[in-house]
Amino acid sequence: MTQPLLQPRVDVLHARELRLVEEPLPPLSPEHEQVLDRIWEEKAQANPGLFDGPVIACAGVDHCGPDTLILRWTRVTYRHYALRWVPGARPLPSLFVDVLQPTADGALLAVRMAPLTAAPGR
Protein backbone atom coordinates (compact mmCIF):
# COMPACT_ATOMS: atom_id res chain seq x y z
CA MET A 1 0.00 0.00 0.00
CA THR A 2 1.52 3.31 -1.05
CA GLN A 3 0.73 6.52 0.77
CA PRO A 4 1.30 9.92 -0.82
CA LEU A 5 4.09 12.00 0.63
CA LEU A 6 3.14 15.17 2.44
CA GLN A 7 4.13 18.53 1.03
CA PRO A 8 7.41 19.64 2.62
CA ARG A 9 7.22 22.33 5.24
CA VAL A 10 9.82 25.06 5.07
CA ASP A 11 10.96 26.74 8.28
CA VAL A 12 13.75 29.25 8.68
CA LEU A 13 15.43 28.67 12.03
CA HIS A 14 17.50 31.52 13.38
CA ALA A 15 20.03 30.90 16.13
CA ARG A 16 23.36 32.20 17.34
CA GLU A 17 24.24 28.90 19.00
CA LEU A 18 23.56 25.34 17.79
CA ARG A 19 23.74 22.35 20.13
CA LEU A 20 23.86 18.85 18.62
CA VAL A 21 22.53 16.02 20.77
CA GLU A 22 22.69 12.38 19.65
CA GLU A 23 19.73 10.17 20.56
CA PRO A 24 19.07 6.45 20.08
CA LEU A 25 16.86 5.44 17.17
CA PRO A 26 13.23 5.15 18.29
CA PRO A 27 12.21 1.47 18.38
CA LEU A 28 9.93 -0.02 15.72
CA SER A 29 7.34 -2.70 16.30
CA PRO A 30 8.16 -6.06 14.71
CA GLU A 31 5.22 -5.55 12.35
CA HIS A 32 6.51 -2.17 11.18
CA GLU A 33 10.00 -3.63 10.71
CA GLN A 34 8.61 -6.41 8.48
CA VAL A 35 6.62 -3.99 6.34
CA LEU A 36 9.60 -1.61 6.20
CA ASP A 37 11.88 -4.39 4.94
CA ARG A 38 9.33 -5.51 2.32
CA ILE A 39 8.83 -1.95 1.03
CA TRP A 40 12.58 -1.32 0.92
CA GLU A 41 13.15 -4.50 -1.07
CA GLU A 42 10.42 -3.50 -3.55
CA LYS A 43 11.94 -0.03 -3.97
CA ALA A 44 15.46 -1.45 -4.33
CA GLN A 45 14.32 -3.90 -7.02
CA ALA A 46 12.63 -1.05 -8.91
CA ASN A 47 15.73 1.16 -8.54
CA PRO A 48 18.98 -0.86 -8.27
CA GLY A 49 20.84 2.39 -7.54
CA LEU A 50 19.31 2.63 -4.07
CA PHE A 51 21.94 2.27 -1.38
CA ASP A 52 21.13 1.41 2.24
CA GLY A 53 24.10 3.32 3.61
CA PRO A 54 24.43 5.23 6.86
CA VAL A 55 22.84 8.65 7.26
CA ILE A 56 22.01 10.98 10.10
CA ALA A 57 18.33 11.70 10.70
CA CYS A 58 16.70 14.54 12.55
CA ALA A 59 15.12 13.33 15.79
CA GLY A 60 13.81 16.79 16.66
CA VAL A 61 14.55 20.49 16.80
CA ASP A 62 13.92 22.62 19.88
CA HIS A 63 14.59 26.19 20.91
CA CYS A 64 16.40 26.75 24.18
CA GLY A 65 15.95 30.44 24.83
CA PRO A 66 15.78 33.02 22.07
CA ASP A 67 19.22 32.39 20.53
CA THR A 68 19.94 28.67 20.99
CA LEU A 69 18.74 25.83 18.80
CA ILE A 70 19.01 22.19 19.88
CA LEU A 71 19.18 19.69 17.04
CA ARG A 72 18.54 16.12 18.19
CA TRP A 73 19.86 13.51 15.75
CA THR A 74 20.15 9.75 15.38
CA ARG A 75 22.03 7.26 13.20
CA VAL A 76 19.96 5.37 10.62
CA THR A 77 20.32 3.99 7.11
CA TYR A 78 18.41 5.09 4.02
CA ARG A 79 16.06 2.12 4.53
CA HIS A 80 14.54 3.98 7.48
CA TYR A 81 12.97 6.54 5.13
CA ALA A 82 10.77 3.81 3.60
CA LEU A 83 8.73 4.21 6.81
CA ARG A 84 6.95 7.01 4.93
CA TRP A 85 4.97 4.28 3.18
CA VAL A 86 4.30 2.10 6.25
CA PRO A 87 0.74 2.69 7.49
CA GLY A 88 0.72 3.78 11.13
CA ALA A 89 4.50 4.19 11.39
CA ARG A 90 6.09 7.45 12.50
CA PRO A 91 9.16 8.13 10.35
CA LEU A 92 11.72 10.66 11.47
CA PRO A 93 11.39 13.97 9.65
CA SER A 94 13.75 14.96 6.89
CA LEU A 95 15.85 17.99 7.69
CA PHE A 96 17.55 19.70 4.80
CA VAL A 97 20.21 22.27 5.51
CA ASP A 98 21.25 24.90 3.01
CA VAL A 99 24.78 26.19 3.21
CA LEU A 100 25.99 29.14 1.20
CA GLN A 101 29.76 29.41 1.11
CA PRO A 102 31.50 32.58 -0.08
CA THR A 103 34.63 31.91 -2.12
CA ALA A 104 37.91 33.84 -2.19
CA ASP A 105 37.01 35.45 -5.55
CA GLY A 106 33.71 36.84 -4.23
CA ALA A 107 31.42 34.19 -5.71
CA LEU A 108 28.82 32.33 -3.68
CA LEU A 109 28.84 28.53 -3.74
CA ALA A 110 25.46 26.77 -3.45
CA VAL A 111 24.68 23.11 -4.13
CA ARG A 112 21.50 21.41 -5.32
CA MET A 113 20.53 17.89 -4.28
CA ALA A 114 21.07 15.20 -6.93
CA PRO A 115 18.13 13.85 -8.96
CA LEU A 116 18.36 10.51 -7.12
CA THR A 117 17.78 11.97 -3.62
CA ALA A 118 14.55 12.27 -1.69
CA ALA A 119 14.23 15.94 -2.66
CA PRO A 120 15.85 16.44 -6.08
CA GLY A 121 16.93 19.95 -6.97
CA ARG A 122 16.47 21.28 -3.47
Image (cartoon, rainbow, N blue to C red):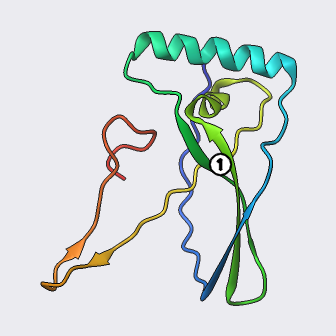
Q: Tell me where residue 109 appears, x and y as whole percent.
A: 24, 70
**Image quarter of residue 3:** top right
Q: Residue furthest left?
A: 105
**Residue 120 in the image: above or below residue 72:** above
The amino acid sitting under disc 1 is Pro
**Residue 14 in the image: above or below residue 44:** below
Write the residue at 40% across / 17% down. Answer: 47
Residue hosting label 1: 93
Tag 1 secondary structure: loop
Q: Evaluate whether residue 1 shows in this view.
A: no
**Mark 1, residues whose alpha carbon is within 10 Å: few (<14), some, or many (≥20)?**
few
Write the residue at 58% across / 18% down. Answer: 40
**Image quarter of residue 28:** top right
**Image quarter of residue 50:** top left
Q: How many marks?
A: 1
Q: Tell me where residue 19 appears, x and y as whole percent.
A: 69, 75
Q: Between 15 and 4, which is closer to the camera in this rendering? A: 15
In the drawing, does residue 38 fall left or right of residue 50?
right
**Residue 90 in the image: above or below residue 31:** below
